[in-house]
Amino acid sequence: MISQIVYGLLFVLALFSAMMVVLSPHAVYGALYLVLTMVGIAALFVLMNAQLAGVLQIIVYAGAIMVLFLFVIMLLNVGRQEGGSGINRSVRWLGGVLSVAFILQVIAMYAGLRDELAANYTLEGAQSIRIDDVARLLLTDYIYAFEMTSVLLLVAVIGAVVLARRRLVQGALEEGERRGF
Amino acid sequence: MTLTLTPFAIEMLLRLVLILVIFHVLLIIVPFMVLWERKLLGFIQERPGPNRVGPWGILQTIVDGLKLFLKEDIRPASVDRTLHTLAPLMTVAPAILVLAIVPFADPVRITLDGGEFSLLGLTIQVAPVVLDLPIGITSLEVGILYYLAITGLAVYGIVLAGWASNSKYSLLGGIRSSAQMLSYEIALGLSLVGVLLIAGTFDLRAIIEQQDGGFWNWHVWKQPVGFLLFMVAGFAETNRLPFDLPEGESELGAGFHTEFSSMKFAMFFMAEYMNMFTFSAVLATLFLGGYTGPIASPFAELGWLNVAWGVFWLMAKIFLIVSFMIFIRGTLPRFRYDQLMDLGWKVMFPLALANMVLTAGVVAVFPPGNRWVTREEIIGQPSTVGLTLGLLVVGVAQIIIMDMILNARKRRLLANAR
């Protein structure tokens, strides 16, 4: 009973802050609302007995990615309303129609699956996911996908370094020419 | 009117009391940590330190706290009002939250016979109950990950304080801190992998139990490199000297908290010392045996004396680590920004990775007894071994190719220069 009330409150919080990400006029506030959304979702995970998913949600999204977002927003010094003003009216209408369609779709899905969901998935009956099991699955059944993902990330990192370095080397070359090497 | 206390309700009440006690002990310890820091710095610099208010200056920081309470809260006209108020709270909250996973002593067995008593005209029936109350707020399966997650959130308070102040110095402090915390979080997380591989669990209480029985069982002997790296990364995470660039008073005024006064400033200050406390507690727990003493506990199992023994040793270890942090502050000068980044990315990160790979190899070949995975499972599967070797080849090839790409033009440039 208590957990259901808490679940409901967290759900409202996550949804509200997700909406505020789009609605808040200032980019920094938008990013902060996104952090709040992440934390809310993490709390929902924990309530559903998935502690690992919840903690990873915070470490990866709230702790790392959103800090970088905020960093970039602050460095670029994006001011009030700047983000929203560039979108023209027809695109806004299209967005509105699409989001209403999406909400209707979710409601339709929920209506269709309600009985099955209520029968099989309850907060109290949620099974705990052990870290051991996740690790074992990652390193046996899903090892190829896991390793491929890591190679992909490595390639991305190397790509970023190469792109950044080329400019540095270019700069050094020009500097050399300027000094008459 | 009667009220029945079920065993569940009794346990909840006891835990609530425990949470309140631990929280307030932390709040009370902070002023004494500040006093000890000032005294110790005084000793290092051959001056007495605070010695006017109370014997040995013992009331100095309490009076300072009172002063901060009574000061006017100045809010400059150009600040972002909401975030200027929220930022100190967002700095203190993670510092307190981290404490939730620190175990303070062995569980204590509580036996209630049950019975009835009346309070304010209310009859309270107590059910007979026997329970083992863990001395600590909670015990999570994901314990250490929780620590990493919450300390990762601590950066927001500082960054937002810098941004909301609408001042150049504050913003520079905030940006420095976000770059610094991101860089050192990686070393912080990686330095723990070694000890976690040996422990085979994320649960702090389980990790302590493995180290029970004498100081030669402590993980620091098995993971000296991990211990050092975690310590250094912890200095950076708590923004202590020699890594206090977000404050950097010689170049940034007071850094991110330049525009804060009275209790808002005090919250940043409190958060720093709370972070020191919790970081020391986690360091002691992971590497120095936590609440276990250097010798096995001489007291009866699960009694209050045993709890006192545990709390004493944990506090003694925290005291030593905090004193060490203060000594470092009194000894080392502040790093330059590029030195800080070099140390984080070029020294600590590779060292932590090497430590991780080495430990993983040793654990795979000689698994400790507590494994949930056997040696056959790790190295017995041809696919695992094959993939590992294959990826190693790919990795080395990538490093070579990268070196070729990155340095080809530089080499040409150097050759031309000659």
Image (tube, grey):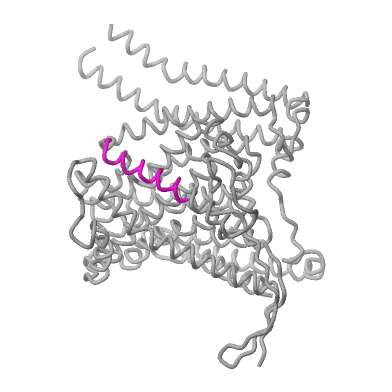
B24 above or below B219? Answer: below
Start and end of the magenta stretch?
Answer: B315-332
Total numbered badges shown on the rendered structure = 0
In the current view of this chain or complex, which residue is farthest to the top? B418
Answer whether residue B319 is magenta in the image. Answer: yes
Residue B411: percent from left, percent from top: 37, 12
Question: A176 and B344: which one is in front?
Answer: B344
> Does the segment drawn in magenta span residue B312?
no
Quadrant of the image containing the N terminus of chain B: bottom right
Pick the front one: A155 or B311: B311
User: Seen in the image, is B233 located left or right of residue B361?
Assistant: left
Horizontal and vertical percent position of residue A150: 61, 33
Quadrant (top left, top right, bottom left, bottom right) of the C terminus of chain B:
top left
Q: Is residue A114 left or right of residue B15?
A: right
Front residue of this view, candidates B248 and B372: B372
Q: Identify the residue shown where x is 51% and y is 66%.
A: A17
Residue B329 lies, in percent from the top left, at 29, 41
Q: Main secondary structure of the magenta part?
A: helix
